[in-house]
Amino acid sequence: MGWVTDHAPHPDDLASCVQCGLCLPSCPTFRLTGLETASPRGRLTAMAAVAAGRPVDNRFAEIMGSCLQCRACEVVCPGFVPFGKAMEGARAEVAAQLPGLGRRIRWLVTVRMLRSRAVIRVATSLISLAQVLRLKKLTPRPFRGALTGVRPLAGRPDSVLATNWPAVGESRGVAALLAGCVMDQWFGDVHAATIGLLTRSGYEVIVPPAQTCCGALAAHDGWADAAREMAAANIAALEDADVVVVNAAGCSAHMKEYGHWAKDGARLAGKVMDVTEVVAAAIEEGRLPRLGETGQTVAVQDPCHLRHVQRVTGQPRAILAAAGFTALEIDPDGRCCGAAGIYSVLEPELSSQLGKAKAEQIRATRSKTVSSANPGCEIQLRSHLAESGMTARVAHPVELYWERLQERDPQPAGR
């Protein structure tokens, strides 16, 4: 039957794979299973088979579904195969050709729920109640790890939507902040740090209320039309800013690829910066200070979509150094922690293996603080660290820097 949508992998993209196998050692699922079908090369071969006429069946869906979309393969690929784009196209075909109750539930989570702030607020209240009442054992098994990993939500800060913050000192322009979906409800302290640092470095910060979820999870799960709609909505809401700042690595990576998802998307994509890039630049230029040494260490976890997709690695470390911390490397290869959006729910065994391995790497450093610039990674790390019996704080690098800056020179936070 072959492909049926206009989102399918492009023939040129599939043909650019030369089957060299250099991607195999970089692929987390291949390393765990040793299966060719669990490698980028194997998955591209399966896509090529469908392009040649084989049907999109349950086996094809399994091969595509086991991929973390960490995109570590793209870093080492000599043919520059756009594997992430091909995978999203293949999953769009699976979603179109293999409908069912499970797919409908996934659509409700990655599209309907994440686009509805009311639904997220209700879900957040329920999670907060479960945390307060310690109802982890009553939580469905696939979600228990996430419940453990979510920050305490009782007394969380208010939403930052529809707020404006004036620049401190000489203005460098207007920065629009992506409030995000769960970031706005679950990671208010990261938003506060982001706004505080942006205003201190000379940006007026706006948080337009018309924005929505960035669309990354929808795109990764095959809901391409919904991802396009979200991209279009965000372009309309954010396009007037001088820079668009995003403090979730998965979201910033996806928005930097808006040129693929929406008409005129490349223009907004060119303005998108991960918050670690903006803050590190402000420190380098002297607009934000370097603080004294603390004598404390921080273990650094590189989110895949920051390291492999955006190729941003030095900036989080520069921020930690400016905050007075000594950064400890836990994995020079930057292997995936296993979070990958809703992967921990869909592929709990593989996700758990990767999460446990990452927790052990952190444990070996003996550091009591871990830096991670992505919400899903933070939740995964906190969950598996707790499971291993290790007590360690997991926080965003800009959050750690902001706290040190507040100790030296307290000013109202971004609230």
Image: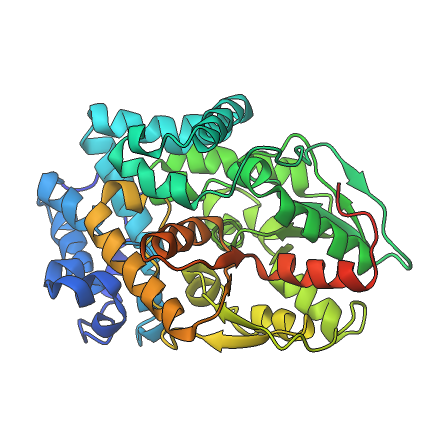
- Residue 147 showing in the rendered view: yes
Splitting the image into 4 quarters, where does residue 61 fall? top left
Q: Nearer the viewer, residue 153 or 310?
A: 153
Q: Nearer the viewer, residue 362 or 172?
A: 362
In the displayed structure, 60 sits above or below 4; it is below
Q: Nearer the viewer, residue 250 or 406?
A: 406
- Give x and y (percent) for residue 150: 46, 42
In the rendered structure, the answer to whether residue 409 lies left or right of residue 182 reads right
**Looking at the image, which residue is at 68% across and 70% down?**
323
**Looking at the image, which residue is at 51% across and 43% down?**
151
The quadrant of the picture occupied by the N terminus is top left
Number of numbered labels in the structure image:
0
- Give x and y (percent) for residue 385: 37, 57
- Residue 67 showing in the rendered view: no
In the rendered structure, the answer to whether residue 61 lies left or right of residue 399 reads left
- Give x and y (percent) for residue 326: 58, 77
In the rendered structure, the answer to whether residue 213 lies left or right of residue 335 reads right
In the displayed structure, 205 sits above or below 280; it is above
**Looking at the image, which residue is at 42% across and 46% down?**
149
Colour pattern of the rendering: rainbow
The quadrant of the picture occupied by the C terminus is top right
- Give x and y (percent) for residue 356: 29, 59
